[in-house]
Image (cartoon, grey):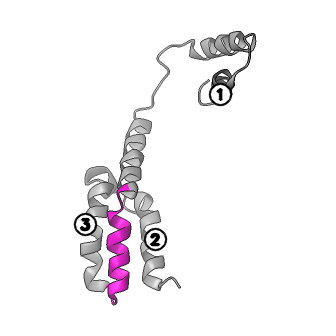
Amino acid sequence: MVSPLTLISLQFLYKLPNGCLGFFIFGGLYELLAALPAQLQPHVDSQEDLTFLWDMFGEKSLHSLVKIHEKLHYFEKQSPVPILHGAAALADDLAEELQSKPLNTEIGELLKLLSKPNIK
């Protein structure tokens, strides 16, 4: 059974990017996650909940995801533009040329990628 503290901590983690946006931008969410278990320790009643918090917020994959999220958030604020103005036309030309080739796994995968809207 999931304890109420577990549910609260998961909800808090989910709301961090929106609820703590100022801290996220200036202090970094990564640093907040690293410090969070120690800050919550006085409010935790059981060792099991404390262990859960340390394990969850200390998880390397979570920290990696947070770093990726921060970099994507920063990149999005830069309003990126295509390097080439004719990049969409180049992608269409390449897809057209690839369709005339004998289909193999790599060509099929590349055609799928070229058909996605974020490539155009």
Q: What stretch is highlighted in magenta?
A: 44-60
Q: Is mark 1 on a helix, strand or loop?
A: helix
Q: Mark 1 points at which residue?
A: 109
Alpha carbon separation for disc pair 1 and 2? 37 Å
Q: What residue type is labelled 2?
A: Leu
Q: Earlier in the sequence, mark 1 or mark 2?
A: 2
Percent position of residue 89, x then y: 63, 12
Q: Residues within 10 Å of mark 1 (few under 14, many from 20)?
A: few
In which quadrant is the C terminus drawn? Answer: top right
**Res 10 label:** 2
Q: In this view, does 118 lie above or below 60?
A: above
Residue that label 3 marks: 35
Question: Is residue 56 rendered to the left or right of residue 113?
Answer: left
Q: Which residue is drawn at 69% across and 13% down?
A: 98
Eye-nearest disc, 1 or 3 = 1
Which sits earlier in the primary sequence, circle 3 or circle 2?
2
Q: Nearer the viewer, mark 1 or mark 2?
A: 1
Name the residue at 40% across, 33% down: 78
Say if the magenta span includes residue 53. yes
* Disc 2 residue crowd, few under 14, some 14–19, many 20+, Cα 10 Å: some
Labels 1 and 3 touching (C-beta < 8 A): no
x and y percentages locating residue 112 in the rendered image? 68, 28
Write down the quadrant of residue 18 in the picture.
bottom left
Residue at screen point 35% across, 66% down: 57
Q: Give whichever of 107, 29 is nearer the camera.
A: 107
- Point out the residue furthest to the bottom here: 45
Q: Which residue is drawn at 30% across and 85% down?
A: 43
Horizontal and vertical percent position of residue 38: 24, 74
